[in-house]
Amino acid sequence: VRDRAARLNRAPQALLTRVDRIQKSALQTVIELLGSLERDGDTIIRNASNLAKSAEITNALKGILTGKEYLTALAEFASEFDKTKVANDKIFAKTFPDFTNSEVADLTLQQSKAYAVELLAGATAQTGFLLPLRGAIEQAVTSGASWQQTLKQMSTLINGDADVLGKLEQHVKQVAWDSLAVADRSYSFSVADDLGAEWFLYAGTEIQTTREFCQERVGKYFRRAEIESWANLDWAGKMQDTTNSTTIFQNLGGWNCRHVLVPVSAAIVPDEFKK
């Protein structure tokens, strides 16, 4: 259980660390290309040459999403989906004697993994990362903006500052934590449902931003019907649009929730919770 919960924290953080390095490298490339823009003092000249160079900068940024370093980082992150399955299967094997591998649960996990990779590298990533940067550089050239201000703006968009994350890191952070956690919980619930599990342990590591909703439940046992009833409650961070009595097992505490529901045998549930 500790291994399963730890992976939900460790894997997204490892991806974000890689993305931070990628952003810094990309910024150096963009600074060099910005330096080649024709200027009149601090003003970027509006001409065909600079428009061509702005397209070159856009292509360089586009190459981040298809570059070896980013794709390698995504491949390593994707492998964590399968590793959480191994951790889940160990739990099931020790808890339920009649546990067997579930084809439906496996397919659910693989689809979740494919969807996460698509969000991190496909059209959504280009919209969240590439388009704002492309718009900024093209506007700077077509409006004859200040070169220094453009450099500062691009630096903030790519690498972030003390107040905001870089655009790619923002996108990855938004997707990585929830995609892995929801996929893990979806797989676990699919198997638990097949086994007819009625009791679950609310487990996981509390972090600085742990919500009161999770603080009240972590380390405690709950019957399936009680978990289903949580969908009718309101709390900060709840996935309002998608949480119902079925999806509560996947969404749990909501956005960026690091907790898991562990199916358990009724035999190990303390009487205080059964009462």
Image (spheres, helix red, strand yellow):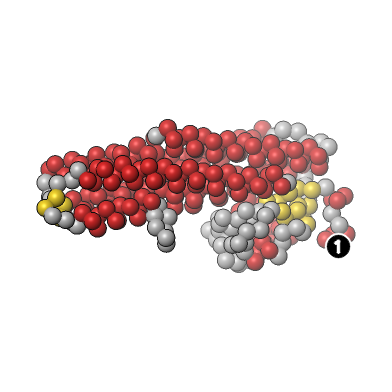
Residue 225 visible to an observer of this rendering: no
Pinpoint residue 73: horizontal percent, then vertical percent.
Answer: 49, 37
Residue at horizontal 77 percent and vertical 59 percent from the top: 220
Q: Quadrant of residue 86?
A: top right
Pinpoint residue 89: horizontal percent, then vertical percent.
Answer: 72, 37
Pinpoint residue 48: horizontal percent, then vertical percent.
Answer: 12, 43
Q: Which of these two is toward me, 86 or 267?
A: 86
Question: How many numbered discs sit on the rendered protein?
Answer: 1
Pinpoint residue 51: horizontal percent, then vertical percent.
Answer: 17, 44
In the image, taking residue 13 as reference, residue 25 lies left or right, namely left
Label 1: which secondary element: helix
**In the rendered image of this protein, does residue 106 appear above or below residue 143?**
above
User: For mark 1, does the 10 Å Cα neighbourhood hold few (<14), some (14 to 19), or many (20 or more) residues?
Assistant: few
Residue at horizontal 42 percent and vertical 62 percent from the top: 163
In the image, taking residue 157 as reference, residue 254 lies left or right, namely right
Q: Which of these two is toward me, 54 or 29?
A: 29
Residue at horizontal 75 percent and vertical 53 percent from the top: 201
Q: Which residue is mark 1?
A: 272
Residue at horizontal 78 percent and vertical 37 percent from the top: 93
Which residue type does callout 1 highlight? Glu
In the rendered image, the quadrant that contains the C terminus is bottom right
Residue 1 visible to an observer of this rendering: yes
Q: Quadrant of residue 107?
A: top right
Q: Which of these two is toward me, 118 or 168?
A: 168
